[in-house]
Amino acid sequence: MSWLPICFSESNWHLTPSPGDRTPERRLVPATRKLRTLEQLIALRRQAQAEGRTVVHCHGCFDIVHPGHIHHLQFARSLGDLLIVSVSSDNNVNKGIQRPLIPDDLRAGSLAALECVDAVYLSPQPTAVELLEVLRPDIYVKGKEYERSVDPRFLAEKETVARHNGRVVFSSGDVVYSSTALINTITQQDPFQDEKLRRLCSRYDVTAASLANLVHRFRGQKVLVIGDYIQDNYHFCDATGIAGEAPMMALRSLDAKAYDGGAGIIASHLAGLGASPILFTSLADDEASDQAQMRLMARGVAVQANRLRRQLVFKHRYLVDQTKLFKVDEGGTSPLDSQAEEEIAGQILAASQGASAVIFSDFGYGFVTAGLLDRVMTPLRQSVPVITADVSGKQSNLLRFRDVDLLCPTEREVRETLSDFSSGLGAVVSKLLTSTGAKQALITMGRQGLVSFDWPASTPAESNHRLRSEYLPALSHHTIDPLGCGDALLATASIALAAGGSLVTAAMLGSLAAAIEVENIGNHAIDADQLIAAIHQRESGFPQTRLAAG
């Protein structure tokens, strides 16, 4: 083999074929020159076509470039003279679990450094269909796993290639790795977490000072909270061994503590943050309900409660040290009848005058009924600037909350609601927002953080039915008890929107509130001072100067 006498001092160089040359001879060029714009890519394709060269195209996320990717790309390069690789941008990697792990510019750069790759394009589209339409490669290569795929996204890509007289070829699959499986084995903190947070803040002109100023605007905001009250009882125990009469653990009770939960803790968070919350819920006519109402009122929550329940809903959790062993639920569903729905709807609409926000929290115990929603949603939508909702439990239903400004479910709740466990997260959330008419969503994924979704334009049609998404990593330093994190997120994100914040700032403040909550045992109402302190504790993750929004 002969080599061209080129001197270089950069380490980021690669070997690439000379134009029109099918021999193994290569010339050295900088890897950065492989990164192409769409216009440059089209020009490259036309030049190759004029020279009679075969163009091969691969598309994917390429989050962690592993041996399976290398084998796949080398196989693709062997089929032609020019290998073009398109990489999904961060906003279009909807795999649901802190993905992508590697930011898109670094993923593209890694592929550009490979000898077998001739050009790399960072694609802003959710699939390769649009690029295939204009690029019209001779061969489109996919992994062996796609050979029998009925995924409509791949089928659309396959149809586009065939329509322009191209071929779809599947690689051998001899070397099989999964980026998702590899990432799931990583137990340490995401090494790019701070960098992702800084980039997000820079794009949206967010600083620690701007977040703190938004928190100060929470004070005095009137917010209605509508939903089921739950009392979370923690039973702290000592494990004394195995019982004599059966192979079961024996516990000795040490202490017990009651925490307000459900809609009660959401209203408590709002009061602690400086808002003026009014809680609409059902209680029982007993001492436990009296005590619950007094606790809430002492925190600054105005309570409008009927006493139609036979008993409160209790959730008993039994712990040894900080480990939860099991949970026992007490109290069933008690739906409102039509007369109670009419009475409560009138109280809600009367109290909504001058409200900045309404939060629905449906835990499936009967207070948020379809009849109640039918009576209040339309007039609330006409008079209240911000309406948000969340659900929990098998008996609640996200699809009942129509035309709200924000939904805050977990990824599992969304997938269970729509019975869709295989589509990308973006596709699932698009179905949710389209089905409900909701404007925005914060989808939580536990320790992996959350993803915000909204329409770039005012309507789905104007947005071409393509969602905008932003990933925010979890902001907690360590996890002690995840109970109530979703409630803290919902309360804080809702009041942030009501105070004039954007979806991104609402997501950041909600995530900080959840981080405070997760670092304590039980349900504790957070307050504005804690939230501002948390902002300043993580100030290194924010830009130090204000940058223009991107």
Image: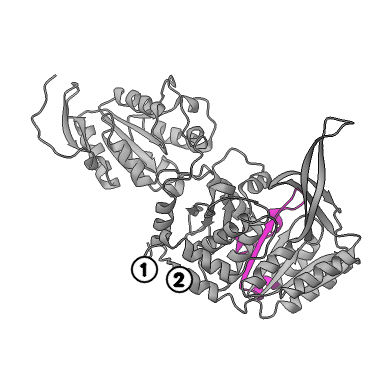
User: Residue drawn 70% across and 47% down?
Assistant: 321
Q: Is residue 166 visible?
A: no
In the image, which residues are magenta? 380-407
Of the numbered discs in the image, which one, if any, rests on residue 458?
Answer: none
Q: Quadrant of the N terminus?
A: top left
Q: Could you say which is closer to the camera, residue 291 or residue 404?
A: 291
Q: Is residue 356 left or right of residue 500?
A: right
Tag 1, which secondary structure?
Answer: loop
- From the viewer's perspective, is residue 471 above or below residue 491? above
Q: Quadrant of the C terminus?
A: bottom left
Please tell me how crowded label 2 is: few (under 14), some (14-19), or many (20+) other residues with Cα within 10 Å: few
Residue identifier under label 1: 546
Q: Earlier in the sequence, mark 1 or mark 2?
A: 2
Residue type pointed to by label 1: Arg
Q: Could you say which is closer to the camera, residue 48 or residue 294?
A: 294
- From the viewer's perspective, is residue 84 above or below residue 231? above
